[in-house]
Image (tube, helix red, strand yellow):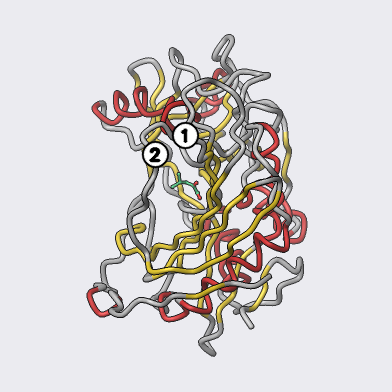
Amino acid sequence: MKVNILTTKKSKLSAVDLSNLGFCKYYSDHMFIANYEGGEWKDFRITPFEDMKLSPACTTLHYGQTIFEGLKAYKNADNEILIFRAQKNAQRFNKSADRMCMPSLPEDIFINSINELLKVDIDWVPKEKDSSLYIRPFMFAQDPYIGIKPAEKYIFMIICGMAGGYYSEPVNVKIETKYTRAVSGGVGYAKTAANYAAALYPAVISQGEGYHQLIWTDGIKHEYVEESGTMNLFFVIDGKLLTPPLGDTVLDGVTRDSVISLCESLGINLEIRKISVKEIISSIEDGSLTEAFGTGTAATIAPIKMIGYKLKKYKIPEVPNSLALKILDKLNDIKYGLGEDIFNWVHKLM
Ligand code: COI
């Protein structure tokens, strides 16, 4: 794969406030671009991060034929760059592409494109505690066409932004019982813009009520919890860790999958099963629910401190030595190269 590289004349790195990274407040100096045309991926290039020129009739702007991924690169104690589970993201990218009638991108192109971009922007991987470089690969339809059909031309790009914490504190989430994120047969499992756009309105309402995010329930009866805004969900009830199953309405989170594997290796009892809203509320009330947390690439593992349901706010007590923290520590050890990578999740940038 030949990549043409045009580097920036003026890096923006010196303007970064490393003590206050936020989440993707600072984009790295360069971006990766490839075009899909005539049935093949071509013109692999790295250019300075800049605005793009698109036709106003570009189908993505009208019909949303677009998908994305999110993964992170970390710096270890020897200043080497470790990229976490790129292959899993490549696989999910293609599942999303398939559902959205978009061309697949060979996994080696996905991973090499990330590697090549990071080699150019290597200084953008921060070393501050708990920080990383968030990598955002995405693909969108390029055809200038107002009718509805799958496009013929696509663009694949990668941009990167520095990441501190996504949430700065444990989160408040509201169980949504009116609006629906996904129904079976829809696009809920795909990482596509529509899922996020449809979630904005109910999420904004909940933010006005003091919540950070929603807990989405099944789209038919709102009886079972599915996932949270940008995270998959875990609960500890009666000492057992529980998470809802995937199906086609829930995003197959890479962090969720990693937590499940870690639980097996740590001997933590985990059950994947449907969890009803009723069970959550009654177990908060009788004290058997002792932890709730969300998992996601951006959010990592985010403890939940309050759950709202039908105008009532239920506080989740803070526990010392929480499972969430235990799992997060193990996960971070692997991501930052502090512990053995027993699952072969990390690849080093060469
Ligand atoms: C991620 O966790 O990578 C996500 O996609 C969340 C994002 C929408 C900020």
User: Type of residue at label 1?
Assistant: Pro
Report which quarter residue 48 is drawn in: bottom left
Figure disc tally:
2
Residue 185 in the image, given as x and y percentages of width and height: 68, 19
- Residue under the image location 54 percent in, 26 percent down: 280
Q: Secondary structure at mark 2?
A: loop
User: Type of residue at label 2?
Assistant: Ser
The disc placed on residue 21 is none
Q: Is residue 292 visible?
A: no
Determine the residue located farthest toward the top in the rendered image. 221
Q: Nearer the viewer, residue 329 or 183?
A: 183
The disc placed on residue 144 is 1
Q: For the C terminus, which image quadrant?
A: bottom right
Q: Are marks 2 and 1 in contact (CB under 8 Å)?
A: yes
Instruction: Describe residue 164's horizontal placement relative to residue 219 as left or right.
Output: left
Q: In the picture shown, does residue 78 fall above or below 57?
A: below
Q: Which residue position holds label 2?
A: 55
Q: Secondary structure at mark 1?
A: loop
- Residue under the image location 55 percent in, 27 percent down: 283
- Residue under the image location 55 percent in, 79 percent down: 81
Circle 1 residues within 10 Å: few <14, some 14–19, many ≥20: some
